[in-house]
């Protein structure tokens, strides 16, 4: 998969490296600001039950 992405990025090695870094940062930002906040209320980790 990664070689396929690398081959399809435009430009030389430096341009490909910058573009790949921008893609990684974009995916991380999408996960951090969109996917994880949407998913967090649906996870059972905050459902703490204390016996009493």
Image (cartoon, grey):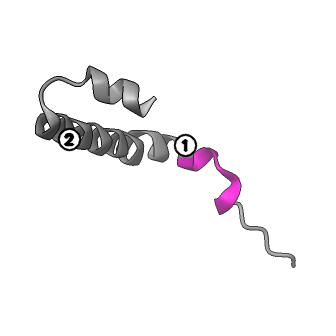
Q: Residue at x 67, y 60 (%)?
A: 45
Foreground of the two, 46 or 32: 32
- Distance from Cα at disc 1 to Cα at disc 2: 31 Å
Q: Secondary structure at mark 2?
A: helix
Foreground of the two, 47 or 8: 8
- Quarter placement of the C terminus: bottom right
Q: Residues within 10 Å of mark 1 (few under 14, many from 20)?
A: few
Which mark is on residue 48?
none
Left or right of residue 1, residue 15 in this image: left
Residue 42: % across, % down: 63, 44
Q: Is residue 50 magenta?
A: no
Q: Secondary structure at mark 1?
A: helix
Which residue extends farthest bottom? Answer: 52
User: Which of pointers 1 and 2 indicates the residue nearer the eye?
Assistant: 2
Left or right of residue 14, residue 47 in this image: right
Asked if 4 appears above or below 39 in the picture, the reply is above
Which mark is on residue 17?
2
Q: How many marks?
A: 2
Residue 20: % across, % down: 25, 38
Residue 23: % across, % down: 28, 36
Foreground of the two, 1 or 51: 1
Q: Quick one: label 1 or label 2, which is nearer the N terminus?
A: 2
The answer to which image quadrant residue 10 occupies is top left
Left or right of residue 1, residue 45 in this image: right
Q: Most prominent secondary structure in the magenta stretch?
A: helix
Residue 32: % across, % down: 39, 48
Q: Residue at x 38, y 30 (%)?
A: 3
Residue span colored magenta: 40-46
* Residue marked by disc 1: 39
Asked if 49 appears above or below 8 in the picture, the reply is below
Dots 1, 2 in contact, CB < 8 A: no
């Amino acid at each position: 998969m990664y070689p396929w992405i690398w081959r399809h990025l435009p430009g030389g090695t430096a341009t490909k490296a910058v573009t790949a870094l921008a893609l990684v940062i974009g995916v991380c930002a999408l996960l951090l600001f969109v996917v994880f906040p949407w998913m967090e209320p649906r996870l059972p980790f905050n459902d703490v039950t204390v016996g009493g």
